[in-house]
Image (tube, rainbow, N blue to C red):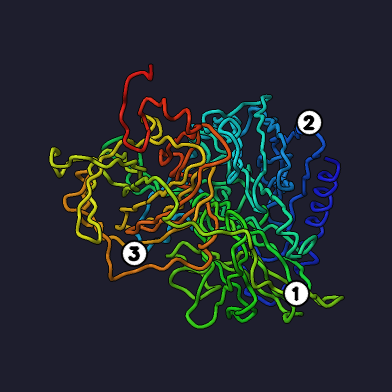
Amino acid sequence: MTDIIDRITEQLAAEEAAPDASVARAPATKTPAEGELTPFVAPLTVPPVLRPDSADVREETEIALRPTWVRLHPQLPPTLMWGYDGCVPGPTIEVRRGQRIRVAWTNRIPRGEYPVTAVEVPLGDPRRDPPPSTEPGRAGVEPDKDVADLPAWAVTHLHGAQTGGGNDGWADNAVGYGDAQLSEYPNDHQAVQWWYHDHAMNITRWNVMAGLYGTYLVRDDEEDALQLPCGEREIPLIIADRNLDTDEGDDRLNGRLLHKTTVIDPKNPETGKPVTLPFTGPYTTVNGRIWPYADVDAAWYRFRLLNASNARIYDLVLIDEDDQPVPGVLHQIGSDGGLLPRPVPVDFEGALATLTVAPAERMDLLIDFRGLAGRRLRLVNKGRDQAPGVPDVPGDVRYPQVMEFRVGECGEPDGFELPEILSGSFRPLTHDVEHGHRLIVLTPPATKGGGGHPEIWEMAQVEEPADLQVPTEGIIQLRGADGKVTTYRRIARTFNDGLGITIAEGSHEQWSFLNLAVNPPVTHPMHIHLADFQLLGRDTYDVSGFDVTLGGTRAPVAPDPGRPIPLAPNERGWKDVFRVPGGQMLRVMGRFDGAYGRFMYHCHFLEHEDMGMMRPFVVMPKEALKFDHGAGHGGHGGHGGSAG
């Protein structure tokens, strides 16, 4: 713990000294308008590293959730936040494969001022008004008193970990001030970057925004043998967008965190409550600071990228001083579940490509700065209708900047060479393995009975569809490539509906996610707890046969054979978050092994998760599953009597 305190003290001292020195070094740029923040004037901070003692698993490591004050930017006053061990982001936890640890996540946040102000603002006229999410301040709207009254009620989920359901951070099992959540992590996994964050039922979106997130690294011998950049040349980059409140009258940023969402339906007829879009904010933080810079040597660096945003999907581009993309220096070597089989070059030449990263996705990146001494490169978020580095306010990118790299000379030549093969242990999954099937339908926001928000529908195949009157609410029909129509009925749509999925531990399953939201199109980053998955394929679907007013299909939805979608090279590794765009079916396969218990899967837009786009599933020994009552067995949703 002393190392953590010393590291925080050093970083705070550097931030206090940063504004004057860094402004003097800053390149010639346009002067920001009055009241706007200057980019790249504060150094990138690096979270402290916590390496739990491996001598005795019974000696748990305490990580306390505490209130803290953070300088998000040198031009801002300190911001009240919550942090793990008082850090935002929390300390980087680092373990070796097979090193079992216990963590006591202890809530030391007393009831008091909640650190996030929440408002819902009207959409306005899209022909003349910028999206409200691009602008700081509350626009005169009074804060939500119910959010202001929230206590510090939190539970920590180690995202990606294979651990028992009792350790996973079940959303209802959040703890209050003075209580602790004790979780045990076996860490029997290939080298990987996981991350930990709050997962409290209904309020995850605000607790994570308050600062409750951090990264977690598992090391192993296969990774060591690659001799990848390490030490000061291995840096976490935890990006998250934020909004800030302003003082009334002068619109001066006051540093207070603002969860500002846009109302698209002021009074939903089904619920009487407003329907809002997920949160996106104008300011990008990297490791908890807005638009920092990093001094790097002319050498290879390894960056462990994590998108910890509530709902923003970033399209990242590396550009130079002239706003031109820098080709040939960026390579992706790992994704959510560990190393990729081979490096994937992220090449910005020709037809512009971006590095797309959705909330909760991780990317293990290498950047070769060797030929760039004396240069200043910027990582930017590209708007959909503008060149890299150019603001795209209608596209919700008011400030494209993410961070700057300032490349210095390297004292000694860097002898690292990019390997041709990264993971000899990687094995692709195929349909040859025995596996079960699940169909999960993601509905448009306006679907009948959905309360104005998108939903997860668990579906079961109807064995005798001739006995069913179609069209009917909750019935989805799919037409296969062979012309055959298969009928499915909805067995669950809300978190508290009956259990729909029970899985035998050790078994493989293919989950197919069909996204019906095409008008407007919505991409859902879906996350399944416990297991790693491989993407099998994407298919474009004609979903016009789905009727939102009916809540079912009037004509079968079907794949479009003329619009194939090849998997991206960086999607061909192990993953636990999968982007599912509207009008697509994504098929993934994984093995549910290494733990038992009740887990969750959900959309990782935190607003969607909190508003019900989350469902449970259970993993149990295959021997015990033989005595199952039938609820959730095989996805058929039957309900039998007692096993006796």
Which residue is label 1 attached to? Answer: 407
Q: Are marks 1 and 3 in contact (CB under 8 Å)?
A: no
Q: Where is residue 442 in the image (x, y as percent from the top left)?
A: 35, 48
Q: Position of residue 247 (x, y in %)?
A: 58, 48
Find the distance from the CA under tag 2 to the CA under tag 1.
43 Å
Q: Which residue type carries mark 3?
A: Arg
Which residue is label 2 attached to? Answer: 59
Q: Which image quarter: residue 405?
A: bottom right
Q: Where is residue 234 in the image (x, y as percent from the top left)?
A: 74, 61
Residue plotted at (15% across, 39% down): 468
Q: Which residue lies furthest to the top in this view?
A: 644
| Quarter that holds the C terminus | top left
First in sequence, mark 2 or 3: give its number: 2
Which residue is label 3 attached to? Answer: 127
Seen in the image, is 642 located left or right of residue 248?
A: left
Asked if one can make out residue 145 in the rendered structure from this viewpoint, the answer is: no
Residue plotted at (31% across, 49% down): 444
Using the image as rendered, state which of residue 639 and residue 360 is in the foreground: 639
Residue plotted at (55% across, 33% down): 165
